[in-house]
Image (spheres, grey):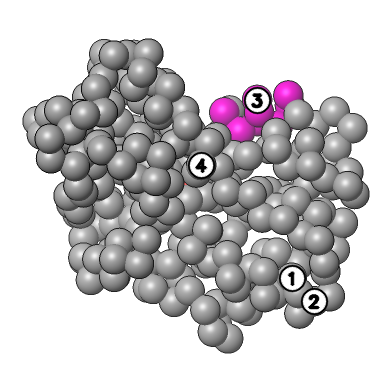
Amino acid sequence: MAVIGIMDSGCGGLSVLRELRKALPREHYIYYADNANCPYGDKSPAFIRQRLLSIVDGFLDRGAEAVVLACNTATSAAIATLRSKYSIPFVGMEPAVKPAALGTSTGVIGVLATAGTLKGSKYLTTKGRFSDGVRIEERVGRGFVELVERGQLTGPEAEETVRRSLLPLLEEGADRIVLGCTHYPFLLDTLKKVAEEEGYTGIEFIDPAPAVARRLADVLRQAGISSEDENPGTELLSSGPRENLLKISESI
Ligand code: DGL
């Protein structure tokens, strides 16, 4: 029986779980939302690593054979430590700079992510690899995570918050916008609406979650972890309130 642990600071990782279930419907998923400590974006890497060690121990107690860090900020802060401490495979998030750089017509791509992700060496390395001939503009999605955690995905306040971070990227000429935080895909309708209202066409928003699902499938195959689960499904665990988590999980 293949049990996969998947975590995020809150509801955001459910945008990844949605893709994992599509690609690998026979696994048993244990989703952990560390929403008592959300947002991770402005927390220190040391704090996030401590949280991850405890979350992964919890997954192992429940029989997890692989863990997905469905959080760019946690991946950036903790994946190297986790890989050196535990023998199970870990799959993390990688901002989709490569498909954005390959797809841009304007030569400018925008990256929306948390401050922690944008400062992390993982992102800086990826950026360095694909920035040849392409200009990369970055913005923290200020307030985006809080909107999603409140379940406020559309409406005037969501639009105003999204506009503040998105518009500067569009004004710089970005035609591909990388969603570098797993909460942001839940704001996709609002992001598209704001871009359209501001008169920008041909803008593509890129979510790395489908690529993460393919990566997990490869990792499980390589590790010989079976996906013939006798008990497929999802368990939802959290360190904080569950109401919005349950609501979003029912919608995916
Ligand atoms: N969803 C997370 C990410 O992908 C964390 C957001 C946060 O807690 O600040 O970065």
If you read the primary sequence from the N terminus, does the residue marked by circle 1 or circle 3 appear first? 3
The residue that disc 4 covers is 210
Q: Secondary structure at mark 3?
A: helix
204 sits left or right of 106 in the view: left
Residue 127's spot in the image, x, y percent?
70, 32
User: Alpha carbon of mark 2 to alpha carbon of mark 3: how far?
Assistant: 32 Å
Please report the residue visible at 37 percent of the width from the left and 13 percent of the height from the top. 222
Residue 30's spot in the image, x, y percent?
21, 43
| In the depicted structure, whether residue 152 falls above or below residue 111 | below
The residue that disc 1 covers is 195
From the viewer's perspective, is the residue at label 2 or at label 3 nearer? Answer: 2
The residue that disc 3 covers is 125
Tag 2 and tag 1, C-beta contact below 8 Å: yes
| In the depicted structure, whether residue 115 falls above or below residue 82 | below
If you read the primary sequence from the N terminus, does the residue marked by circle 2 or circle 3 appear first? 3
- Residue type at tag 2: Glu
If you read the primary sequence from the N terminus, does the residue marked by circle 2 or circle 4 appear first? 2
